[in-house]
Amino acid sequence: MLDPAQVQHIVEHGQLIGWRYTGFASQAPLESQVFLPEEVWFEKIPNPFDFWRGMPPLYVAGHAAKTDFAASSFVKGLLENNADLGVIVRTEEQLDNTQQEQSWPLCASESAARAPPTAHSYSGMEPRL
């Protein structure tokens, strides 16, 4: 098994003709050499930005793991706050920064010591708990 960072594709006239391995370190398993395409097993996921290199198969697993971590972090935060998402303020018009800052103490008193921040949306001013 070779380090993919040390292998470059060799392409001529739109055809893959080989793979060049450059083993730089003294700890490299092989010395520098060129392999034919049929001598190399290169497993990849299609990549529109680099056809010959593709994407590593673990890229998909990494994306799924990041999504799972984000979901579990959200649920953990929700449970730590007793499923309280905070106060949502709806207004007819968009509030400027000064008005938003003025509304935060009001919302803080509405939600007592709740941790989640206040969310602002537009169309009718009514705090919802």
Image (spheres, rainbow, N blue to C red):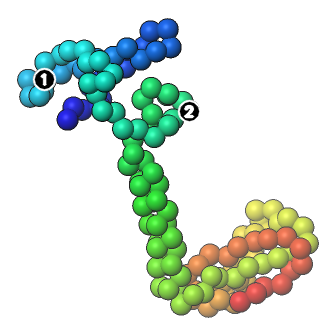
Q: Residues within 10 Å of mark 1 (few under 14, many from 20)?
A: few
**Image coords of residue 96 (percent x, y):** 81, 62
- Is residue 127 in view? yes
**Which residue occupies 69% across, 82% down?**
87
Question: Does residue 11 lie above or below 44 as drawn?
Answer: above
**Which residue occupies 89% across, 73% down?**
123
Q: Quadrant of the N terminus?
A: top left
Question: Does residue 60 lie above or below 120 as drawn?
Answer: above
Q: Which residue is mark 2?
A: 48
**Which residue occupies 67% across, 76% down?**
118
Question: Does residue 80 lie above or below 120 as drawn?
Answer: below
The image's mark for residue 19 is: none
**Image coords of residue 99 (percent x, y):** 80, 69
**Which residue occupies 60% across, 87% down?**
84
Which element type, helix, strand or loop, lies under badge 2?
loop
Q: What amino acid is at disc 2?
A: Pro
Q: Residues within 10 Å of mark 2 (few under 14, many from 20)?
A: few
Residue sitting nearer the eye, 125 or 13: 13
Q: What amino acid is at disc 1?
A: Leu
Q: Which residue is mark 1?
A: 30
**Image coords of residue 32 (percent x, y):** 18, 16
Q: Which tag, 2 or 1, sits closer to the chain's start?
A: 1
**Image coords of residue 20 (percent x, y):** 28, 17
Q: Quadrant of the C terminus?
A: bottom right
- Is residue 8 in view? no
